[in-house]
Image (cartoon, coloured by chain):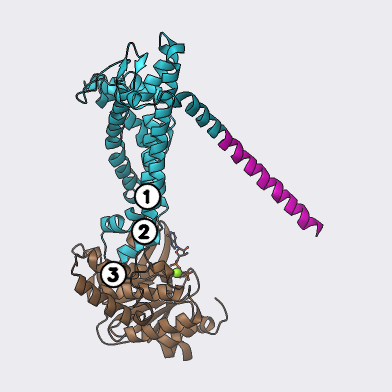
């Protein structure tokens, strides 16, 4: 199911996911394209987080889980044995629902992903840190506080720090799992502007509870319910002329 | 109105009871330290600390016992610290949480409750006899190490538990390997807690008598051990002898109190080290 004709950057086909015996995703097929923002919406517990976490195999760390179906990144199955999960996660970055800075300085937070990949050159690190912070629209606010502990930033700044940290390793896809649910409206507006900007260079997938947000930032919207994909189409189409009764009920606030 | 005053009174009574309980504990501790300090303080001198016992331990010092206890504690640490921390890392970070791991964890908790004399006898069988280390510093240190191991594992695992999962996931999501995420984003925050627990365990081991009784501690050796295969004098055992087994108990009483004072100072010193260490590492993190 692909509303765009170009080759998808990342694509799932008939994706099933199980937590032990319970099935959290049922034959979900979604394709996400370069330079586009794809939003995933749906009622709580419908499997949005589960879905987005399968895209960088973050669910691998939860014992007793199982994936069936295919996920293709640039046409290549991410579960094939010659794919290194560490490499995959570098290419598919993730920003979590709750800002999760490490208890290190602002600088060390951003440099973390580079250092674990062996970069030691101080000048290069400094350049990447600045570029990433600018990319996350945070540079002006923290350029004099690079050595401060990241915990001393405000919640919204922390979330942008996490975005900058994800940008630093130069991923190709960035996954956002409800990035604004723990921050205030002004910080939310900043993050939304940022996402708008990021799509110039990245493939963006965002889970959100906020319908307006999906409408504002995304090009495509997937509506899920009870682990199933109900409807997936251009965002304007979903919000103005949904094909499915359930989608219409949900976006008009009749349930959820 | 009346209800809230009643609540306030209840709260004051509660606080008062808690304060009293703490005061009582502190009072007993200080009384105890004061008594030993008063009776043992007189025996402490440079000679007492730096010389071997003389004339059937009625004169002289406790230098060999201090050295013996330090050496044996080092062996204990060499066994219990790396092994305990590694086991905790494995159990908490790598092992799948199955019935078997739960059973292992339960067994470890239970092992920390086994009386120390049982470890002593086990040490005799395993190290002294089966492994032929004889009665020696090595056997005694390994025995104490075994005894300390459950404490180190448990304390280390508790310390690992306090590190939020979001640190681990955050690192993995940036392309860290599992070990990288543990080494750079979990251990630095767990190590202060691990060390505190470990040092407390070592302090406890340093004060134990039963495990070294049959595995290497000597009644009286007026010289220093020359190798790890030698027997040794140890502070707790020396104290036990001076307090209960000596032929002139009344005469050596001040020496016994002096020994007790040194032992307590050593253990408190170790505990203080743990506190300072944790404080310093915590601050560095900020
Ligand atoms: N670790 C887990 N173990 C077992 N079941 C889980 C686990 N995580 C999620 N689930 C279940 O899988 C289903 C989907 O959960 P998921 O977190 O993906 O929903 P969600 O759409 O992200 O919800 P929300 O909007 O509340 O974040 C839910 O029924 C949930 O209870
Ligand atoms: Mg979720």
- Marks 1 and 2: CB-CB under 8 Å? yes
Residue on which the image places disc 2: B285
State whether residue A72 is above or below residue B36. below
Chain painted in brown in the figure:
A
**Which residue: 34% across, 11% down?**
B56
Ligand 1 lies under 8 Å from the Cβ of mark 2: no
Packing grade of label 1 (10 A; few <14, some 14-19, many >=20) is many
A251 lies left or right of A175: right
Q: Write down the chain letter for disc 2.
A: B
**Which residue: 29% across, 87% down?**
A200
Ligand 1 lies under 8 Å from the Cβ of mark 1: no
Q: Write down the chain letter for disc 3.
A: A
The quadrant in which the N terminus of chain A is found is bottom left
Q: Nearer the viewer, residue B79 or A207?
A: B79
Q: Label 3 vs label 2: CA separation?
A: 43 Å
Q: Closer to the observer: label 3 or label 2?
A: 2
Is tag 1's residue or tag 2's residue first in the polypeptide sequence?
A: 1
Q: Which residues are magenta?
A: B1-27
Residue on which the image places disc 1: B192
Chain B colour in the picture = cyan
- Picture disc at residue A70: 3
Magenta stretch mostly in which secondary structure? helix
A180 lies left or right of B140: right
B259 lies left or right of B135: right
Residue A97 at x, y = what percent?
43, 70
């Amino acid at each position: 199911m692909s509303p765009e004709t170009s080759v998808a950057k990342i694509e799932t086909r008939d994706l099933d996911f199980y937590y032990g015996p319970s099935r959290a995703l049922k034959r979900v097929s979604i394709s996400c394209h370069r330079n586009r923002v794809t939003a995933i919406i749906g009622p709580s517990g419908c499997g949005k987080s589960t879905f987005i976490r399968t895209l960088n195999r973050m669910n691998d760390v939860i014992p007793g889980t199982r994936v069936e179906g295919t996920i293709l990144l640039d046409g290549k199955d991410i579960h094939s044995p010659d794919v290194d999960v560490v490499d995959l996660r570098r290419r598919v970055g993730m920003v979590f629902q709750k800002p999760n800075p490490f208890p290190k300085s602002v600088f060390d937070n951003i440099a973390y992903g580079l250092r674990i990949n062996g970069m030691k050159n101080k000048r290069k690190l400094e350049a990447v840190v600045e570029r990433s912070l600018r990319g996350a629209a945070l540079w002006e606010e923290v350029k004099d506080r690079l050595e401060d502990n990241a915990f001393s930033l405000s919640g919204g700044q922390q979330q942008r720090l996490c975005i900058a940290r994800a940008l630093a390793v130069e991923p190709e896809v960035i996954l956002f799992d409800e990035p604004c649910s723990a921050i205030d409206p002004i910080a939310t507006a900043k993050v939304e502007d940022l996402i708008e900007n990021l799509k110039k260079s990245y493939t963006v997938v965002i889970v959100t509870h906020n319908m307006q947000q999906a409408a504002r930032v995304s090009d495509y919207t997937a509506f899920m319910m009870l682990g199933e994909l109900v409807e997936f189409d251009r965002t304007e189409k979903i919000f103005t002329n949904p094909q499915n009764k359930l989608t219409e009920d949900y976006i008009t606030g009749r349930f959820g | 109105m009346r209800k809230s005053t009643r609540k306030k009174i209840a709260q004051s009574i509660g606080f008062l009871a808690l304060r009293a309980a703490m005061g009582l504990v502190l009072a007993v501790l200080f009384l105890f330290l004061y008594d030993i300090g008063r009776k043992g303080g007189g025996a402490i001198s440079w000679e007492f600390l730096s010389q071997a016992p003389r004339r059937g331990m009625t004169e002289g010092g406790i230098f060999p016992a201090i050295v013996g206890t330090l050496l044996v504690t080092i062996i204990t640490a060499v066994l219990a610290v790396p092994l305990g921390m590694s086991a905790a890392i494995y159990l908490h970070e790598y092992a799948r949480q199955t019935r078997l791991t739960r059973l292992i964890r339960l067994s470890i908790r239970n092992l920390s409750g086994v009386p120390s004399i049982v470890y002593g006898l086990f040490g005799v069988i395993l190290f002294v006899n089966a492994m032929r280390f004889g009665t020696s510093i090595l056997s005694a240190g390994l025995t104490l190490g075994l005894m300390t191991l459950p404490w180190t594992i448990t304390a280390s695992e508790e310390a690992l538990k306090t590190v939020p999962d979001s640190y681990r996931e955050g690192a993995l999501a940036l392309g860290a390997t599992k070990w990288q995420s543990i080494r750079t984003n979990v251990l630095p925050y767990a190590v202060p807690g691990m060390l505190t627990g470990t040092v407390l365990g070592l302090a406890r081991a340093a004060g134990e008598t039963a495990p070294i009784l049959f595995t290497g501690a000597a009644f009286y050796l007026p010289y220093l051990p020359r190798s790890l295969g030698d027997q040794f004098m140890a502070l707790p055992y020396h104290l036990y002898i001076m307090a209960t087994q000596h032929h002139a108990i009344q005469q050596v009483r001040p020496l016994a109190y002096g020994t007790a004072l040194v032992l307590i100072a050593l253990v408190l010193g170790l505990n203080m080290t743990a506190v300072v260490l944790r404080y310093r590492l915590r601050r560095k993190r900020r």
